[in-house]
Amino acid sequence: MSNNRTLGAVALLMAAILAIFGWGLVAPFAYEPVGPRAFPMITALVIGICGAILLVQGGGEAEPVNRKTLIGLIMLCLTLLIYAVLFERLGYVLSTLGMSTVVALIFGAKPHQAILSAVVLSVGSYLLFDHGLDVVLPTGLLGDLL
Amino acid sequence: METLAFLMHGFAVAATPTNLGLAAMGAVVGTMVGVLPGLGPVNAVAMLVPVVFALGLPPESSMILMAAIYIGSEYGGRISAILINVPGEASAVMTALEGYPLSRQGLAGVALSLSAVTSFIGSLLATIGIVLFAPILSKWALAFGPVEYVALMVFAFACLTGLLADQPVKALLAAGIGLALSTIGIDANSGVMRYTFDMPNLIDGLAFSTLVIGLFAISELLILLQTHHGEKSVQIPKGGRKLFNLSELRFTFPAALRGSAIGFFIGLLPGAGGTVGSALAYSTERKMAERSAKTNRFGNGDLRGLATVEAANNSASNSNFIPMLTLGIPSSGTTAIMLGVLTLYNLTPGPMLFTSQPDLVWGLIASLFIGNIMLLAMNIPLVGVFARMLTVPAWVLVPFIVVVSAVGVYSGKSASFDLVLMVAVGAIAYWLRRLQVPMAPLILGFVLGGILETNLRRALSLSAGDAQILWSSWIAIVLWAAAVAILVLPHVLRRLLPPEARLSED
């Protein structure tokens, strides 16, 4: 799955999307000889040519990852995505507590290590950023407590 | 004399308590991330982009902080290369070649202290080079119009794809993706929305901090997971001399000077930073040593090899600032991010900076002197403390990086949208990096995309659409020719470089 051919195909797809959605980019009143469309078209061309070369060339198989690592990678991506979505809804402290626990476990922490470090990190960083550095962070469910 | 006055003014800027504090902080943070394998200046600087805004730092202070991190990580990268044979960052690959054998022979203390001093020599000479050459170059570059700028940027991209990359097609693809991403959002000239897909969050374009953090922090975590093999126990060799002696310094001093010179000139080229510089210095020194077989210990821990590599490495990272400050062309991922930060302050990178922002330019240059002295003072006695960073387990480090990244991205726009985007960019970047698509051209494309397009359109407006204007001046012609030469040159260069140096990304 992960080789130059796939990369080339994806690049061609990207070039096509750029070209299709960019074709209609025409200024209602043109003050200059080159409008907003030309530059995106040039980049689409560059990407497309690179994609075509990679597609023809092939090869470049990426080193396969073992099953355990693959599961870890998917878990890590999902955790980060869920963290991003729940960041505002749950609030900073709760969402960080959950994220940090799971991520520490993925990176091989023992459960008590994961939970302890997550508590220290979420509360500590909240105090540092929100109170110390005046970065406003969402309070979420703990709204009244904080 | 005029330069000297400006430099003195720069020292006045850099010596304010805030800026001194930031330089010291940057030096410590830089050395720490430099020590950690996988994390380098790019990652640290990327995570700091939103933080400097949250702190409300003026532009010169953020530049001083970021520069200190950049230089500091060059000092840090050598520590793990010497002690555990794992380069702390890309440009320390060559350091391990001679440094690790030395440490196996019980000379770790000597190797660490000597390389700290030669790093300092390289940095110092390169910084003097900046003072001498940057003002001249910037005066010359003031004559650049839109036509010359277009050619200059094409030259920069040619350097990146030709010199740096093992696989030029992938580097060019990365640059193309960066250029394409830079077109997202409202077009300032015509008011047309480009690739926003009716999402209000995209009208202003992709947020720079979201993109760099996704590219350099989140994707790095995924790479860390892939290379993570449980905790290594790091033992710092005990005993042995802590400090080099005078005859060792005298023995290696010429090598350090040669390394500094090579690093300096390589660092001037867009796209070629410490990695290429140190590789070239190493192979030069090795060839010279082979002529006198008596003292040649290359491969088994030759102090000259270590000295030249570290000098070249640091010299190149410092001279990187010349094209960045005078032409607005960054030559590494880190300087590209620093340049992007300047645009966030509404400053236009380019030769005008020297006249319009003397505080910033000269404060930064002066802070390089100060930062290097701090780093030398810190690195010899505290090397054991920094080496301790290697024992911090990944499960502590990774959640910390996620938190700093997320808070940084969120503080910019206060929108969950950018957090989701950050994760998506990180996952895609991980996939691209696995396929050996380099990230430096991508971020360079994104930073330069807007400037390139503006200048291209301006040039063609001047000629009413006639493309011939693009090679109408002799400066432009020279740059176009140089761009072509650069694309041919690597085939020659590649024969000169040892194979270890071919893969580089910084």
Image (cartoon, coloured by chain):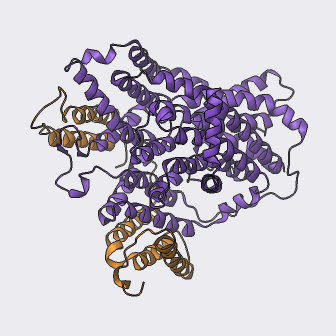
Chain colours: A orange, B purple
* Front-most of residues B306 and B28: B28
User: Looking at the image, which residue is at 79% across and 55% down?
Assistant: B381
Q: Residue at x 31, y 65 (%)?
A: B415
Say how many tags the image has: 0
Q: Which one is nearer the viewer's eye here, B389 or A4?
A: B389
Left or right, B218 with reference to B366? left
The x, y position of residue B420, in whole percent, is: 32, 62
Q: Is residue B123 visible?
A: yes
Image height check: is B306 above or below B73?
A: above
Where is residue B442, by image quadrant?
top left
| Residue B449, horizontal then vertical, whole percent | 34, 37
Q: Is residue B6 toward the left or the right of residue B304 in the image?
A: left
> Would residue B271 be visible to someone looking at this image?
no
Residue at x 49%, y 68% (from the top left corner): A133
Q: Identify which residue is drawn at 38% across, 32% down.
A: B169
Q: Nearer the viewer, residue B391 or B479?
A: B479
In the rendered image, residue B252, in percent from the top left (x then y), is placed at 81, 33
In this rendered view, identify the residue nearer to me: B126 or A131.
Answer: A131
Picture layout, residue B464 above or below residue B64: above
Residue found farthest to the left: A28
Is residue B10 rendered to the left or right of residue B444? Answer: right
Q: Is residue A100 left or right of residue B458?
A: right
Which residue reaches farthest bottom? A145
Q: Quadrant of the N terminus of chain B?
A: top right
Quadrant in the picture for residue B246? top right
Pinpoint residue B34: horizontal percent, then vertical percent.
62, 52
